[in-house]
Image (cartoon, rainbow, N blue to C red):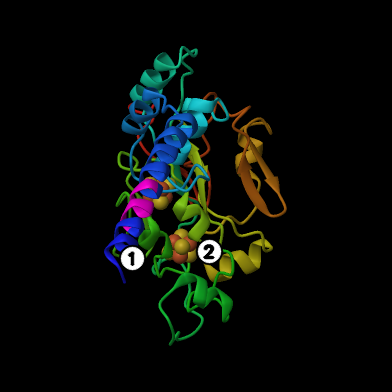
Amino acid sequence: MTVITILYAILTMGALGALFSVGLSIASKKLSVEEDPRLIEIIDLLPGSNCGACGFAGCAAMAEAILKGDMEPSSCPVANSESIEKISKLLGLEVKEKVRNVAVVLCRGDRKNQKKKAEYIGVESCLAAHLVGGGERACNWGCIGFGDCVDVCPFDAIYMSPDGIPVVDRDKCTGCGKCVEACPRNIIELHPINRNVFVLCKNRDNPRLARSVCSAACISCGICERATGGEGFKVIDNLAVVDYEKYTKEPILPTDKCPTKCIVIVGDPEKEK
Ligand code: SF4
Ligand code: SF4
């Protein structure tokens, strides 16, 4: 290889390198997308837990959707009202009041109240037990007790009582709904924090069967419905349900009238008004 050939190769490579770098720098200028600085501010104002309860992959994706106007600032179930207000103001939107949702476990079938039907030897998971006969507790509608709901909570807001029923810490609960999804018995629901009266049972079997498996089951006696004149409580398919549109504390709060005490005040009505 002669010196001229080497020089020729160096010059060719140098010219090509210069050409590509000019092309790349023009392309980067032309194709670059200006990032809206508000995006970072919205990301900072969202909780950063990336819990996915909003349906997006994480808080950054949710922030982008809020910035584009595809989602409301209040759509993050976990963000507190102060953050929602700040995001709304940042985007020049009307500030919408948000009542925080919290999880409520609609069952009192712990180890004391629910009968045992079998010995369960298997994976200690509610879902696994549910799929292979329902675990060891007798009620087919009630809590299985292995705490799948506790395991999934990203906020440490739900724990098992000594008698094996989940208890929600309403101060810590963000209403993300992970426990609702995890429970194979569908006994956990999200409700506004200012809702305090609940029927803690989901058993829709006939009264005799319901009572035979759990001493705290609703026996569809209808006392609550009669006590409220049908305005607030109704028995539907063997189960008392609260009609929150109609329910008022006056004239009668049927908590103490329920023979199995499955109508319960949850939380602190004074504090959570
Ligand atoms: S208790 Fe349920 S809804 Fe509340 S933070 Fe935990 S997983 Fe979310
Ligand atoms: S996931 Fe459902 S069945 Fe399992 S412990 Fe929680 S409430 Fe009970």
Up/down of 117 relative to 205, above or below? below
Where does residue 16 sit, x and y in percent of width and height? 40, 49
Q: Is residue 39 left or right of residue 182?
A: left
Residue under numbered circle 1 = 163
- Depth check, front residue: 95 or 60: 60
Give the residue number, with chain letter if any, for mark 2. 142
- From where the camera sits, is residue 76 visible? no
Quadrant containing the N terminus is: bottom left
Taken as a whole, is the magenta stretch helix, strand or loop? helix
Gap in Å between the C-alphas at discs 1 and 2? Answer: 14 Å
As shown in the figure, which amino acid type bears the numbered disc 2? Gly
Q: Would you say 244 lies left or right of 114 here?
A: right
The front one of 169 and 6 is 6
What range of the chain is rendered magenta? 10-15
User: Would you place residue 112 above or below residue 230 in this image?
Assistant: below
Circle 1: residue type: Asp
